[in-house]
Image (cartoon, rainbow, N blue to C red):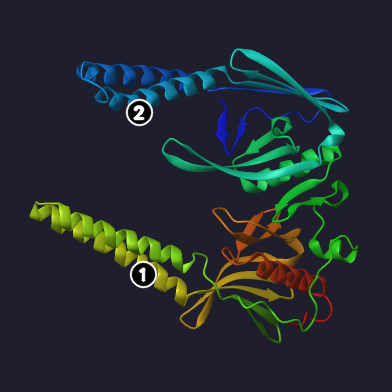
Amino acid sequence: MAISADGYQFDYDKAVPMEARPVSATVRGNLAAGLLMMAFAVVWTGFNILIGDALLAEPMPLPLVLIPFLAVGIGLFVYGLKLMLYRRAVTIGPDEVAIDQRHWFRTRRLAAALDEYPGVLRKKVTFRRSKRNEEAFLTVLKHTTRDLTVVLAAARDEAQGRARTEDYARWLGKPALEETADGFLARDPDDLDKPLAKLVAEGKIVSGYREGSTPPAEIKIEQGAERIVVSFLKGAIAMWVWTMFAGIAAAAAFLIIGFVTDLEAKVAGAAAAFLVLVGVLYGARRQMRTTRQILIHRDRLEFAEFAARESVVKHTVRLDEIETVRVAKGRYSGFGLYVDTDAGTFEAGAGLPKGALEWVRDLIVAAIATADGSEAQA
């Protein structure tokens, strides 16, 4: 059963086999979901035509009221048909990738040399199923042309998804790719599972940090005898966003109180809007009183929050487990700092400017490189 998310179609049970090439795998559409959607579209359209039959006898432009409802029904029917017809067969040979994709009632073939693919990308996507938000971790043979990009496998677990990406990179002799703010970070097959410190020692990763450099305005550095404390002075959610939500709550309260005649409805609506307003203000106040931190020790990184005069550690990662540190686009907007390990990816600094996060990234890389020797100086 194909699942669609962020423009990718995948099936957990349809991985490309890692065997002697050529190998093939086929992902088909969701027949049951397509039929159900088409049936609903027919019922929806028929119901609206029946209800709006009287409107059709009225003079223009009153019958035009039916157009949006009929357009929804037609759109659902077309999408359901597309789900039923979807089929994508991928064949990976020694030197070429061929894709046979059904486009409505005909099949189109695409092909590209394997050398055109820069590497194997690990991609996290989100989708909604059974009224729940779910995540999938895809292994993608990346191409600059989206139609030639191939989903090699999908996993429900992040650690399994990362392991599969590395396995496919070795199988194809391609770099494993991680997304960054400037493109992709590539790790050669021979470097997979190497700790970051070793890659720095081999000169394959270079830190731009310089001892004594002034941190960006959004960053505060505290140098201790046993650790470096990196504090992010800007919250993950900008104050204008908090202000916008507060304004919407206040406007909703005004509309309810101003236009509802029933006294009980006025009281209930005003109370609900007030609670939303209080919740928004509480969230903004909590963010202002909480400082996100990264604590750099000689043997580990700690992701913490500082509030009420103490740091509360949320996650701990050993330095010898870290394979990459990168700046990439955030889940919703802006940028974030990502620390990748085989066990998972840890995010910090969401909402900060790209330049500030790159400065912290270089500091962490420099600290990891010198963890066994002299302590990194901030």
Which SS class for mark 1?
A: helix
Q: For this rendering, which residue is in front, 371 or 102? A: 102
Q: Which mark is residue 8?
A: none
Label 1: which residue?
A: 282
Q: Residue furthest top?
A: 105
Q: Residue furthest right?
A: 202
In which quarter of the view is residue 339 placed? bottom right
What kind of residue is marked 2? Pro
Which SS class for mark 2?
A: helix
What kind of residue is marked 1? Tyr
Answer with mark 2 or mark 1, whichever residue precedes in sequence: 2
Q: Residue at x 80, y 53 (%)?
A: 193
Q: Position of residue 114 (x, y in %)?
A: 84, 32
Label 2: which residue?
A: 68
Q: Give the left or right position of residue 192, taking residue 281 as reference.
A: right
Q: For this rendering, which residue is in front, 59 or 310? A: 59
